[in-house]
Amino acid sequence: MTYAVRYYTRTGNTKKLAEAMAAELGVEALPISQPVTEGVDVLFLGNSYYAFNIDKEVKQFIAGLDKSKVGKIVNFGSAAMLNSTYKKVKAEADKVGVAMDPTEFHCKGEFKGIHKGRPNADDVKAAATFAREYKNKNE
Ligand SMILES: Cc1cc2nc3c(=O)[nH]c(=O)nc-3n(C[C@H](O)[C@H](O)[C@H](O)COP(=O)(O)O)c2cc1C
């Protein structure tokens, strides 16, 4: 299996998770400004909620995916109140015919004094474990 990791971040939380996951997958965590040009089986896509939605840049990134180059998306993130951006990401992925893996990683992320310090060291470790186990299961 081949992997790529892309993330969108405003305050650094998603980047932390992306780097921990990418290290396990043996690839570099890159911001979504870097398009996926190589063919990959699985794209780990880090994103979050901002005012109840995913960012427009994330939607544009997904719209620009080439379904012949991306097998499927694994969603991950650290929204503060809501638990998952899965449905929002899937709605965009459906438009371009890229499949979503039903598994995803989510932990809490700090926002305006709520969930202070998160993702913390345990969250980062859990993200790494998720990626490692995903890889082992799919080898
Ligand atoms: C402007 C703004 C709006 C946000 N709105 C929401 C929201 O509607 N629901 C939610 O669960 N989290 C919300 N959050 C929290 C972020 O999703 C959370 O802090 C996340 O960890 C941010 O990741 P990042 O640092 O990679 O950008 C918001 C954060 C910001 C900065």
Image (cartoon, rainbow, N blue to C red):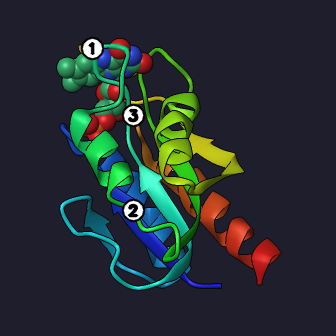
Q: Is residue 45 visible?
A: yes
Residue type indicated by callout 1: Gly
Does the Cβ of the disc 3 residue fall within 8 Å of ligand 1? yes
Upstream in the sequence, badge 2 or badge 1? Answer: 2
For label 1, the residue is 113
Name the mark on residue 118.
Answer: 3
For label 2, the residue is 65
- Looking at the picture, how far across and down is residue 100, in whole percent? 64, 51
Q: Is residue 138 left or right of residue 94?
A: right
Q: Is residue 123 visible?
A: no
Residue type indicated by callout 3: Arg
The CA distance from mark 3 to mark 1 is: 10 Å
Secondary element type, mark 1: loop
The image quadrant where one finds the C terminus is bottom right
Judge by depth and name the residue closer to the eye, 87 or 109. 87
Indicate which label's residue lies in the foreground, 2 or 1. Answer: 2
Q: Are marks 3 and 2 in contact (CB under 8 Å)?
A: no
Secondary element type, mark 3: loop
Quadrant of the image occupied by residue 99: bottom right
27, above or below 116, in the image: below
The CA distance from mark 3 to mark 2 is: 30 Å
How crowded is the residue under tag 1: few (<14 C-alpha within 10 Å), some, or many (20+)? few
Please report the residue visible at 42 percent of the width from the left and 42 percent of the height from the top.
Answer: 120
Please report the residue visible at 36 percent of the width from the left and 21 percent of the height from the top.
Answer: 53
Residue type indicated by callout 2: Leu
Please report the residue visible at 32 percent of the width from the left and 58 percent of the height from the top.
Answer: 64
Q: Is residue 101 left or right of residue 92?
A: right
